[in-house]
Amino acid sequence: MIKLHDSGAYLVNGTELVADTPEAARIIADKTGKTVTCEDAKKETIAYGILKEHNTSDNMDKLKIKFDKLTSHDITFVGIIQTARASGLQKFPVPYVLTNCHNSLCAVGGTINEDDHMFGLTCAKRYGGMYVPPHQAVIHQFAREMLAGGGRMILGSDSHTRYGALGTMAMGEGGPELVKQLLNQTYDINMPGVVAVYLTGEPVKGVGPQDVALAIIGAVFKNGYVKNKVMEFVGSGVEKLSADFRIGIDVMTTETTCLSSIWQTDEKIREFYEIHKRPEDYKELKPGDVAYYDGVIELDLSEIKPMIAMPFHPSNTYTIDELNANLMDILDDCEKKALVSLDGAVDFTLKDKVRNHKLYVEQGVIAGCAGGGFENICAAADILKGSSIGPDEFTLNVYPASMPVYMELIKNGCAATIMQTGAILKTAFCGPCFGAGDTPANGAFSIRHSTRNFPNREGSKLQSGQIASVALMDARSIAATAANKGYLTPATEVPDKIGAYKYFFDKTIYDNRVFDSKGVPDPTVEIKFGPNIKDWPAMPALPENLLLRVVSEIHDPVTTTDELIPSGETSSYRSNPLGLAEFTLSRKDPEYVGRAKAVQKAQKALEAGECPKSALEGLSEIMDVVKASFEGVNHNTLGIGSTIFAVKPGDGSAREQAASCQKVLGGWANIANEYATKRYRSNLINWGMLPFVIPEGDLPFQNMDYIFLPKIKEAVENKTDKIKAYAIKDGKTIEFTMTLGDMTDEERQIILKGCLINYNRV
């Protein structure tokens, strides 16, 4: 079904793969009459061409990218604009779209979320942006419909910023990277590797884009095959897929940990732009005659079967047939994974869902940027036609990704078909994807065509003894399961029910409701601040010497950003740095906040010119060891802060708050064996936190130990990679080494200044 090449390969004339062997040059010369070097062929990928057009440096190995457009939603745009305002923002220098699809629901008894919306609207007016009101469109659907264009690059403050199927290379990053673009700075990365996703064949009826996506994720996530690389979709199978189908695969590439994605384009993508009244935005994209890829994923679409990603990660994949045939064994494996993911906080089982040897689920959801597309919902309607979801536990909720999609579903009758079954059609909202909508009952099992199934993404609270779980599936198989009243069923059992519908895009509702400044700022507009919108607290510069206390130690194989700062109910506090920080690691390590605050008191004492020893119990003995072992350490040359250790932190969301909340609580570093994503490491750096890496093996420290970093400021200034550190135990120092990895000069300055705000402050 899927083959991963052990090495790179050449793609000749867009159709034939030639393995990178000593014979490759001769084979290519025989086929093309050309002599091509590997370095020249690397320049013939679609990705290289787009990156070159957007690179402002004279070095294609060290890219400095300027994006064409920016986009954010209402969990992120307040913090981004507040950061940029603190650095002297006068206007948005590039088109910047503020969507409102995450905090769409107002807090009970308060106006927190709507205050954020009004902040966004007034900022769009003042600085010259675009504002999409709540319930109109999820961020990525609006970008597809109104922003994407062939050969463009878009940066979004949401990890699923992916528009490669439409010929747009898009990247999801933490908010500070958007701040840099708003301040006319650049996105600085090394030239990424490019991996071909070579598609052949054609999907069978009943197989949808989520099935293909989950098959790819299952094959590449654990081995890091595409980590921080660009996935480039090529091959004869591409033309067999509709634009909607390609979009559905593309948005899920985020879950592979790739940097971005891009697809070859054709007449079906031209038609997409014509339907959306933007024919001028189409651009034909294809690799050159001989293009070199750093790796290849070969995938025969005809061999893909309906898939399911069981809790607690999109890579925990099986075919639905495989799950049904091996139910108890696979459910037993889920229980073992739960012991790691849930830390034994609650009893977890799915074996109680087995009824008459079949798996019963209590909820189905088709939603968001992955599931809420036109073709997904039409296919679901066809499968559901004439059936009932029943009056028992099972429920089905469907969220079209935008109001134009919703209106077309009403016009073609699919909306009525779905509602007649007992399912509920709701407005565009990302809540089910991050735990702010459709929270199941305790112990319930939900199947969703959405983006993630991490623990708590469905909204349950381990700290309150509540747990539900999510499996990812395609809308078609969710509908087949709904028609079977909650018993897990692959859509390939009802393939003949699925028809074809033509989409007609009507943007009248956008014309009537979306505010568009056309890029013209109005500095007379007063920004509206709700009482929950707070400025960032002051953050000190990196001191000459640094004393860290480890206040959390996490040994899970991967730590997600959801575990670092929970999604769901905490999202109402995204505009309040101090308020949100109270939730840091609350689901993973409830003791973290108190420990971090205790260490922060010592740093605040230093800043006030007071002795820090009395501010933190046990610090006096530690300071005695430091002063006895290292010269020149005093109150004027020392900083005190906290750090966490995690094996592989940062998988999942781009949310900068996973790092900023630690910084707000006095965090100065993370220590890891590796970082799950580039975006999380960038978030750490932009918030002035040192991204240390330590080799796997026995740690020289443990939770609540102190680590001393002498002359750390000098090491950062001198671009020293190997950092000498000292664990302090039993009155002695234990030397060990950590590394900082590759950093640009600008990133080092951000670390030295203490954060991006300080670096840019005017």
Image (spheres, grey):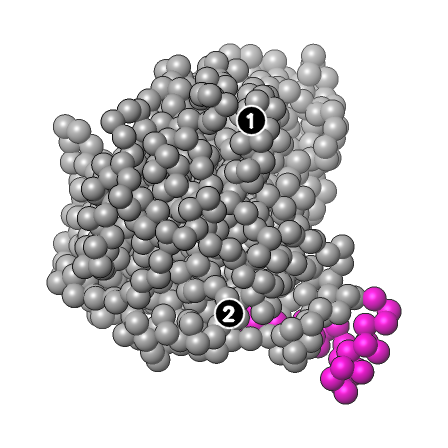
Q: Is residue 158 visible?
A: no
In the image, is residue 96 above or below residue 622? below
> Residue drawn at (50%, 48%), measured in percent from left and top?
211
Sequence-first tag of 1 and 2: 2
Task: Look at the image and give the residue range highlighted in magenta.
Answer: 21-50
Name the one closer to the observer, 501 or 139. Answer: 501
Name the one closer to the observer, 647 or 78. Answer: 647
In the image, is residue 759 above or below residue 604? below
Q: Position of residue 416 (x, y in %)?
A: 19, 48
Q: Secondary structure at mark 1?
A: helix
Q: Secondary structure at mark 2?
A: helix
Q: Which residue is mark 1?
A: 327
Name the one closer to the observer, 712 or 670. Answer: 670
Q: Amino acid at mark 2?
A: Glu
Asked whether the residues under the numbered discs 1 and 2 touch, taking CB atoms below 8 Å apart as contact, a structural biologist would say: no
Q: Amino acid at mark 1?
A: Leu
Q: Which residue is mark 2?
A: 239
Q: Is residue 386 magenta?
A: no
Q: Mark 1 or mark 2: which is in front? A: 1
> Residue drawn at (55%, 75%), measured in percent from left and top?
286
Mark 1 and mark 2: span between their CA atoms?
36 Å
Q: Is residue 29 magenta?
A: yes
> Residue drawn at (69%, 32%), measured in percent from left and top?
725
Left or right, 543 with respect to 493, comes to right
Q: Quadrant of the C terminus?
A: bottom left
| Residue sticking out furthest to the right | 22
Q: Position of residue 277 (x, y in %)?
A: 27, 74
